[in-house]
Amino acid sequence: MDKLMIEGGYPLEGTVQISGAKNSAVALIPAAILADSLVTIDNLPEISDVHLLAELLQEIGGDVTLGKHEITVNPENMIAMPLPNGRVKKLRASYYLMGAMLGKFKKAVIGLPGGCNLGPRPIDQHIKGFEALGARVTNEQGAIYLRADELRGARIYLDVVSVGATINIMLAAVKAKGQTIIENAAKEPEIIDVATLLTSMGAKIKGAGTNVIRIDGVESLSGCRHSIIPDRIEAGTYMILAAAMGQKVLIDNIIPYHVESLIAKLREMGVTIEVSDDQLLIHNSREKKGVDIKTLVYPGFPTDLQQPFTSLLTQAEGTSIVTDTIYNARFKHIDELRRMGANVKVEGRSAIINGKTKLQGARVRASDLRAGAALVVAGLLAEGVTEISGLEHIDRGYANLEEKLKGLGAKIWREKMSEEELEQVKS
Ligand code: EPU
């Protein structure tokens, strides 16, 4: 097992290319199950979640070719193979196999998903949607069993605005008989991306990106080619890094509209940002003011950027308050930041940060993907060397992190963990 080493204090300068969106990719790959012929998805990020999903599609009989930035899926010989255990448990997004397999085969058995540990992450709204479409859903020994004689369109009101439930219900409904209406749907750009792929396959979907989505079921879906949107969370992470340590950093291949809430907050802190069609230029700004943020559903401030943003706030003057209304226990990075010298405490669903403080390199552990991003930001800011374990979380979502950061001038590398360190991680 590797650990990530960062020698902090070096300014960042240059251009960073943003990869395709992880949270789109993990839904688009399962969506390919619904087609009757070849689906090609490009602008694919090189992350471990993509490899796991490609292997899962192979397990159910898919003919899958995975290139560096492209995946081709031939779903012709796929079967409704039960997936109660194994890889399916390694990533949270495997829940999209439920909607896609139910939509295609009218049945599925999927082990309850793993993924980032952010506190309770129920899937009751997904199940409510599947049941409304006519599926019988049971939980048997940690796996969800879904069966339907036929799927019929229904009106589904989501009690909680959920990205996953919105996408999963779309996947199950595109081939159902009649019309499905999802009310109080999530509006994230990744939902529009999935609807775009399904529409290219022949689905009839209106309203993706608004809070009411209408789907008219079709008999069959055919193959197509689709290009994934840029990853707004990866882009946001590099924007935060640039604000923290940048001289002049150009963030390339992004949709600035998708990161408006972050642009607004960085500007409020005093960071200078030039926006053009698909790029952002972030200038060095030594003095930064503290700000408060509250995470909200899109287009509000994303919960996925709350953790790296907290590291940046340790460098801002005054007191800042970060409140997470989506996952109120998403604060596992705070203890690690304190280990590095940050003046931060958690009260309820908020972190209170007093800045500005000098950070010191330390041995820290990434407990989840974005906690890892927070520690990378902190490591680049810190004096001395920071060693980050739990790298498997970071690899789930950040494509070529070291290469991209080295390209900007960071001192970052991987090292094998010693036996003693491995023991410590396990205990
Ligand atoms: N929720 C329920 N019931 C449900 C579904 C969700 O109560 O059936 C609650 C959740 O517990 C949470 C809120 O609703 O409090 C929002 O959850 P949502 O379903 O929107 O989250 P998700 O679809 O499981 C996706 C991203 C997450 C991101 C959230 C919020 C993927 C694969 N994951 O998760 O991304 O934090 O939306 O934007 O798309 C990440 O990239 O690091 C990550 C965790």
Image (spheres, rainbow, N blue to C red):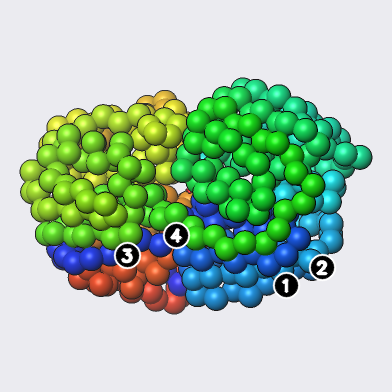
- Judged left or right of residue 412, residue 121 is right
Nearer-N-terminus badge (4/1): 4
Q: Name the mark nearer the viewer: 3 or 2.
A: 2
Mark 3 and mark 2: Cα distance apart in space: 36 Å
Amino acid under disc 2: Asn
- Judged left or right of residue 280, residue 172 is right
Q: Quadrant of ligand 1?
A: top right
Measured along the vertical axis of the image, is residue 211 above or below residue 137?
above
* 349 or 387, nearer to the observer: 349
Occupied quadrant, residue 25: bottom right
For label 2, being within 8 Å of ligand 1 is answered no
Quick check: marks 2 and 1 in contact, CB under 8 Å? yes
Q: Element under label 2?
A: loop
Q: Which residue is mark 4?
A: 20
Q: Which residue is mark 2?
A: 77
Q: Position of residue 426 (x, y in %)?
A: 55, 61
Quick check: marks 4 and 2 in contact, CB under 8 Å? no
Mark 4 and mark 3: Cα distance apart in space: 10 Å
Residue 180 visible here: yes
Occupied quadrant, residue 325: top left
